[in-house]
Amino acid sequence: MKAKWFSTLLIVMLLVIAVVPTAAAQSGSSTRQIPAGGTTSIRPGVEGADTLQQPELRRKPQGQGEAGEFNRSRPGFKNGKFPKKPLDAPTVPSSAIAGSNPELALSFNGLNHRDQRLANGGNQFSLEPPDQGLCVGNGYVVEVVNSVLRVWSTSGAPLTGVQDLNTFFGYPAAINRTTGAFGPFVIDPVCYYDPENQRFVVAITTLHQTTAGVFTGRNTIDIAVTNTGDPTGSWTIYYVPAQNDGTEGTPNHGCTLDGSAPGPCFQDYPHIGADKYGVYISTNEYDLFGPSYSAAQIFAFPKAQLAAHPSSISVTLVEDLSVDGSPGFTVWPATSPAGQYSTARNGTEFFLSTIAGDGSETGNPTGTARRIGIWALTNTASLNSATPALGITSRLINSQTYVFPPNSNTVRSRVLAIFLRR
């Protein structure tokens, strides 16, 4: 049923975009050159001591808001996007649990918290949540989790040890357990395998900070691409400035410090996808230390350039996405099977987005929606030119009602209250 519904959605998405090709064109874009930041490889160090060490958790920087704490409101009911009843959600019947799963051919353990915490001699923090990226191709499995990565064969045999992401991307350790110095804060890893060029791509968001653990405002989208089809060999790194405050060649998106003075923006929750011509990383942009959400952004990289790992690479930023008058939120790029890319309008990459997120981002105070945002980024073949000229369209289409899940601490409190009453 789920597969049938999703296939129907994709067909509708293609028809809607095809019928109205330019009416919803929006957003600006700019292209800049990013120099290579050197090469790297997965070279694990010794494992740290299997014991608690203080600080065990990354502490909140003094005098600054915690990155990721976004408690804002932006009201809005219009055009029937949001159901009037927050709990107006469909009831899904249960299905029988299979006694065995004949479709499972192989399973093996991936990275766990102990792997993450003890990497790089234990110069790591205990982290939550364990955001994961996974990509498979050419006989290899690459898994990346906050904040380590490892390579296996497709038969489940480990081909490398566990490498911390700070070291892999050329940064000091997350924390130096001897001196107490902090390194950059690397988060939200994603992974993609390019089947045409046999390249693995790993990307992260990095928040730069002083050795005392104070965020400087600078943040980057860091992208590493294998130089061959073998992820146990060499990779090339590119550091893309992403604070969007007018520095380092970034546009100025008007983000603020604490809701008042101008300040840097922050790119959160990256997702990765690709079509025939490009690799795309989408983000949600916030004030780094302020109260506001801006909109979704798309960083577009030429796939052929990435595969060639040149001394500099072009990146096109598609800015401040919106759909039906509301800011785009978590605009998720598609990853098409090899050879099944859309060549319409000189190359098209599709995206889907929710409008049932936190009300501060989507303008939806109910956490419930019955429409889905669909997006098409067109003329993607132009990414291979000196002057990319991308177009983007967006629409809302009807869907079954769906609900933004409650926070885990809210669920935990309710379960505890029920337990205590008993």
Image (cartoon, helix red, strand yellow):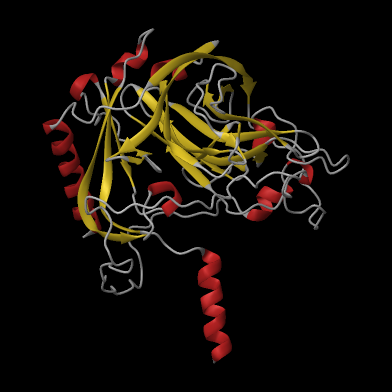
Q: Quadrant of residue 222?
A: top right
- Say if 410 sits above or below 343 in the image: below
Q: Foreground: 262 or 136?
A: 262
Side (left or right) of 363 relative to 292: left
Tell me how many marks there are.
0
In the rendered view, tell whether residue 218 sits above or below residue 10: above
Q: Is residue 140 visible?
A: no
Residue at the bottom extreme, as displayed: 422
Considering the image in quadrants, where does the C terminus appear?
bottom right
To which quarter of the image does residue 297 belong?
Answer: top left
Q: Please identify the residue farthest to the right as the structure is shown.
A: 178
Q: Is residue 92 left or right of residue 41?
A: left
- The residue that appears at 49% across and 30% down in the rendered structure is 201
Residue 181, image x, y percentages: 82, 38
Q: Position of residue 293 (x, y in %)?
A: 48, 42
Query: Quick one: 326 or 331, which is closer to the camera?
Result: 326
* Res 88 visible: yes
Q: Which residue lies at the image location 11% right of the left edge and 32% below the top edge? A: 19
Q: Which quarter shows the N terminus?
A: bottom left
Going 75% across and 32% down the picture, which residue do you hit? Answer: 172
- Residue 397 position, x and y percent, is 20, 47
- Is 129 situated left or right of 185 in this image? left
